[in-house]
């Protein structure tokens, strides 16, 4: 770029300052320029080509032909080829049947083009090992986005407009106006192509651009700059807000119970007595009796088994949610209500997990009525009201109850990484039944095969170990303070007479306990 003028120098200096301030580039990095052939992307390519050596980066360009404008689409592609050839910049070309994609996915043409474009850029970035993708959004685009957000209704983040970086998408021209871009190209004597669809106000954004902003300029000639500067102040204020909201979220949320052993009555404590004393009821057992006793020893195993099918504990859509959103979460309602803005705190927790504003409002207004057991679902998560808490977990596919029949001793595969081993063993005078969380030892004398492993059903009853009377499984789990999700995931093992032998991971049935007279034990081990 040999030409020089105040316009060119100012433009280049402004880009240089912006990319350094926001740390958009890494020396020795490779970057893809999204090149449409329009003024914005052409100026982006030219200015970054000018700064390429100074920034220590390498550039490649990518052009998408959406075949939406007939000859204009071909014209744009040829223009990009010629420009990149002249600048010695490698160019990647891709063609899309945008109408077919839109019809297939039931989205608008604009949304189809956007989806195709960014999916291709990301795939290309990975294929050529590029750092990031540079797109040519400018200040006016950011102002239009902010106004669109206002019209649609938005939270604080919608008032930031477009950000300089979003994952691997970076925007080096965000501090420039469209007018500055055109002046820069004029000063260079560079041409560009014009998309005729930008000249019609048949899209919401174009209505903002062509109708609304000119009216606002009648009130303030510098309205775009004023709105942009306001968005920068909102962005800075949000840094303080985000820090405060993260503290609030940390205050009201905890992982599911299972990190400590307070009041422990887990399987390891309650499954079997220390001595073979069957006539001694076990009323309660504290964690002091057992070292290193996890409160919910089988929580992970149960989630792996449930629902005895594919992809447990993952959203239905793609099974790829981030780990931070893929773990169960407990929200304390009393602590939530103590926050300066309980509803907004709740919004910040639930919105990233797919809950709509209307759903969040419904959940918030229901806090006082406490409809325990009620479940509200988003596209990826489920939320349950549970006494003074809200339980949040990733949505799992509706389980098809397909009991696993166990006709004889052996090892049975429950999932890719979980097996149930069923074996018998002789009991001598020194026989000690297992007390581990994933193992149950029962008197084999009265147990009739085939056994069945299934989810709990309404009306299930058993005699909890150490007790003498029947108890509903649902009541037992309620007494154990299990939430509705844990109840839904609970497994039982029954014999041929449909008697419950083992409430898996919780408690065995007292009728099948090991006694001093037991000659043969049935050992059930989750592996």
Image (cartoon, rainbow, N blue to C red):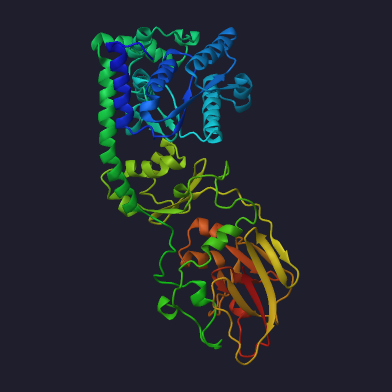
Asked if residue 54 is positioned above or below residue 86 in the image, the reply reads: below
Asked if residue 57 is positioned above or below residue 220 in the image, the reply reads: below
Residue at 70% x, 62% y is: 404
Q: Nearer the viewer, residue 289 or 170?
A: 170
Q: Quadrant of residue 215?
A: top left
Q: Quadrant of the N terminus?
A: top left
Q: How many marks?
A: 0
The percent position of residue 84, horizontal first and vertical second, equals: 50, 17
| Residue found at the far bottom of this picture | 429
Q: Quadrant of the C terminus?
A: bottom right
Asked if residue 182 is positioned above or below residue 269 in the image, the reply reads: above
Q: Quadrant of residue 348?
A: top left
The percent position of residue 156, horizontal first and vertical second, equals: 32, 33
Residue at 58% x, 58% y is: 304
Q: Quick check: 333 left or right of 37? A: left
Q: Nearer the viewer, residue 161 or 168?
A: 168
Residue at 43% x, 41% y is: 352
Query: Could one spot residue 367 in this view of the protein?
Result: yes
The percent position of residue 141, horizontal first and vertical second, equals: 38, 20
Asked if residue 37 is positioned above or below residue 521 in the image, the reply reads: above
The percent position of residue 320, horizontal first and vertical second, equals: 54, 44
Residue at 60% x, 49% y is: 398
Q: Quick check: 113 left or right of 243? A: right
Query: Could one spot residue 163 in this view of the protein?
Result: no
């Amino acid at each position: 770029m040999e030409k020089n003028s105040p316009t060119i120098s100012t433009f280049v200096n402004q880009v240089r300052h912006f990319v350094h301030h926001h740390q958009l580039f890494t020396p020795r990095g490779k970057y893809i320029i999204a090149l449409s052939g329009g003024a914005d992307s052409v100026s982006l390519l030219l200015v970054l080509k000018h700064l390429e050596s100074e920034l220590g980066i390498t550039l490649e360009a990518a052009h998408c032909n959406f075949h939406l404008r007939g000859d204009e689409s071909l014209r744009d592609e040829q223009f990009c080829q010629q420009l990149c050839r002249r600048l010695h910049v490698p160019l990647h070309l891709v063609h899309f049947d945008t109408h077919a994609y839109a019809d297939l996915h039931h989205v608008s043409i604009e949304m189809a083009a956007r989806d195709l474009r960014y999916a291709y850029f990301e795939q290309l970035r990975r294929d050529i090992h590029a750092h990031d993708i540079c797109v040519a959004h400018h200040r006016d685009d950011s102002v239009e986005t902010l106004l669109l957000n206002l019209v649609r209704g938005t939270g604080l983040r919608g008032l930031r407009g477009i950000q300089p970086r979003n994952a691997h998408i970076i925007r080096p021209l965000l501090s420039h106006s469209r007018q500055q871009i055109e002046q820069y190209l004029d000063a260079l004597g560079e041409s560009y192509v014009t998309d005729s669809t930008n000249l019609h106000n048949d899209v919401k954004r174009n209505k903002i651009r062509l109708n609304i902003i000119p009216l606002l300029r009648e009130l303030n000639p510098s309205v775009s700059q004023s709105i942009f500067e306001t968005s920068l102040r909102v962005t800075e204020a949000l840094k303080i807000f985000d820090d405060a909201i993260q503290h609030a979220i940390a205050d009201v949320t905890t992982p599911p119970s299972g990190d400590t052993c307070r009041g422990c009555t887990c399987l390891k404590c309650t499954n079997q007595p220390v001595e073979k004393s069957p006539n001694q009821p076990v009323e309660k057992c504290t964690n002091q009796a057992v070292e290193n006793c996890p409160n919910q020893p089988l929580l992970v195993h149960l989630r792996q088994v449930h629902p005895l099918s594919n992809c447990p504990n993952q959203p239905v859509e793609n099974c790829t949610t981030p780990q931070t959103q893929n773990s169960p979460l407990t929200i304390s309602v009393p602590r939530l209500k103590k926050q300066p803005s309980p509803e907004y705190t709740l919004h910040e927790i639930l919105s990233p997990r797919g809950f709509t504003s209307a759903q969040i409002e419904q959940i918030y207004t229901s806090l006082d009525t406490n409809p325990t057991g009620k479940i509200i679902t988003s596209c990826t998560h489920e939320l349950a009201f549970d006494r003074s808490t809200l339980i949040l977990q990733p949505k799992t596919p509706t389980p098809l109850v397909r009991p696993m029949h166990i006709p004889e001793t052996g090892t049975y595969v429950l999932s890719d990484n979980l097996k149930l081993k069923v074996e018998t063993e002789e009991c001598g005078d020194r026989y000690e039944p297992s007390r581990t969380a994933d193992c149950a030892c029962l008197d084999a004398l009265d147990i009739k095969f085939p056994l069945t492993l299934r989810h709990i059903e309404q009306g299930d009853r058993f005699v909890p170990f150490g007790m003498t009377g029947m108890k509903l499984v649902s009541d037992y789990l309620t007494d154990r303070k299990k939430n509705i999700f844990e109840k839904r995931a609970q497994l039982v093992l029954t014999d041929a007479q449909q008697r419950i032998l083992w409430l898996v991971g919780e408690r065995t049935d007292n009728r099948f306990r090991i006694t001093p007279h037991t000659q043969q034990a049935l050992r059930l081990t989750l592996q």
